[in-house]
Image (tube, rainbow, N blue to C red):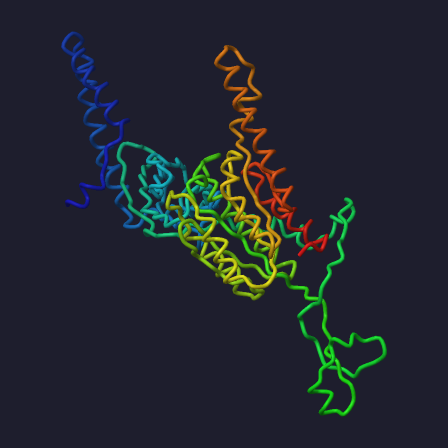
Amino acid sequence: MKKLYASLFLNNRLFYIVAFIALLFVAGFFIPVLFAIAKVALFTISVLAFIDCILVYLVSKGFEVQRTLPERLSNGDDNKITLLLKNNYKFNTYSTLIEELPFQFQKRDFQFRQVLKSGQEKSIHYNLHPVKRGVYHFGHINVYVSTPLQLATRKYILGDEKEVKCYPSFLKLNDFDIKAVSNNLNSYGSKKIRRIGHSLEFEQIKEYVSGDDIRTLNWKATAKRNHLMVNQYVEEKSQPVYSIIDKGRPMQMHFNNLSLLDYAINATLAVSNTILRKHDKAGMLTFSKKIENLIVAEQRSSQMNLISEALYNVSTDFLEADYSLLYASIKRKITSRSLLILYTNFETLDALHRQLPYLRAIAKNHLLLVVFFQNTELNTIVDQKAASVEDVYDKIIAEKFMYEKKQIANELKKYGIQSVLTKPENLTGSTINKYLELKSRGLF
């Protein structure tokens, strides 16, 4: 009885009808015929309400809901969720479904109203747009079912609780695959630069013929075969590319509900996918006060899973990043020349100049690409019409900061350091384009 009592609700329609009957009883003191009508109406509504309560409990499982969730959520993207409804009653039902969404969405009134015919099945689709990585806990689905009379409602608690992890954006990886397999950059004037040096990727040992480089003579093989043998090398096609993410305090600025750190994480996943599609080696690391999440650049089938799992746990410690530690770690752990894509943010020239000696030192042995962000909120201030003296000052200061961003890019270029200055929402596309440009020019 306690369970029955807890799941039974009387609808507002019933209370409105009872209130109207009460008014008839009051009026019956003055008009006797209304008193008789009120008694008949009260008896009738009582019988109908009783019948309605029996009908909603006539079938033990009169309503079913099955929730279909993805195995993992993609951060910053629309993730499709499906609810499959089924009405097992012998009559049409009026239902209200209330989803217990994860607390990260802060929605307590997420509901659907549905009318289903007897035996009808229906699917409901909706999208969730997470903006934080982590574990998302989905609760039960509360369903309130009424008969066509809509005098009483039965509550069902359906759907299993489930936890789903939210990973860096992976749904849009296919959007960038076409860039990975195209060579359109050559048609836009990108010039391929001849690389000077000697490849270290060994192919085979062969007999010496006139014109072969005598520096490749293999003396051990020569002694065994009793005539000259040389090592043959091929151009090394798989180049190591590392994505380096600054986890410092400046990367916690938010644009469109996503932090710069999350934009960098999403871009790292997409760029790594493109790198592997172009037959290069993808690796990554994060840094602040210490080096973490180091994944050695490799080209293997499990590399994307390794990178995705490492990015899932990346978070900031809200400290100033130690670039001297970054330089020392790169010097020790990344021995071969590589393309290093550094995701960071410099708001002023002074902030750049504090770290510039370390960036220049890194760029001596590697091709360094610094990716930093435009402050799109400054664009809004600059584009607005000044209505007061204070607005004029705000526009001047905003323009000054925007100009400094361009100076930062010029300062990096002066020391041979590549850079990308981009809006946060364009980060992934801009970085992939720059990588493809550098590769087409043979700079690494």
Q: Which of the two residues, 83 or 164, is positioned nearer the viewer here?
A: 164
Residue 134 in the figure: left or right of residue 418 = left
Quarter of the figure that contains the N terminus: top left
Looking at the picture, how far across and down is residue 323, in whole percent?
A: 47, 49
Disc tally is 0
**Residue at image coords 64%, 62%:** 279
**Residue at image coords 73%, 76%:** 216
Residue furthest toward the top?
30
Looking at the picture, how far across and down is residue 262, in whole percent?
A: 47, 44
Q: Which of the two residues, 84 or 235, is positioned nearer the viewer here?
A: 235
Looking at the picture, how far across and down is residue 298, in whole percent?
A: 56, 64
Q: Which of the two residues, 9 or 438, is positioned nearer the viewer here?
A: 438
Residue 78 in the figure: left or right of residue 407 = left
Quarter of the figure that contains the C terminus: bottom right
Quarter of the image for residue 310 reads bottom left
Quarter of the image for residue 110 reads top left
Looking at the picture, how far across and down is residue 206, in whole percent?
A: 76, 82
Vertical arrangement, residue 254 with respect to residue 311, above or below: above
Vertical arrangement, residue 371 with respect to residue 226, above or below: above
Vertical arrangement, residue 328 with respect to residue 93, above or below: below
Residue 95 in the figure: left or right of residue 232 = left
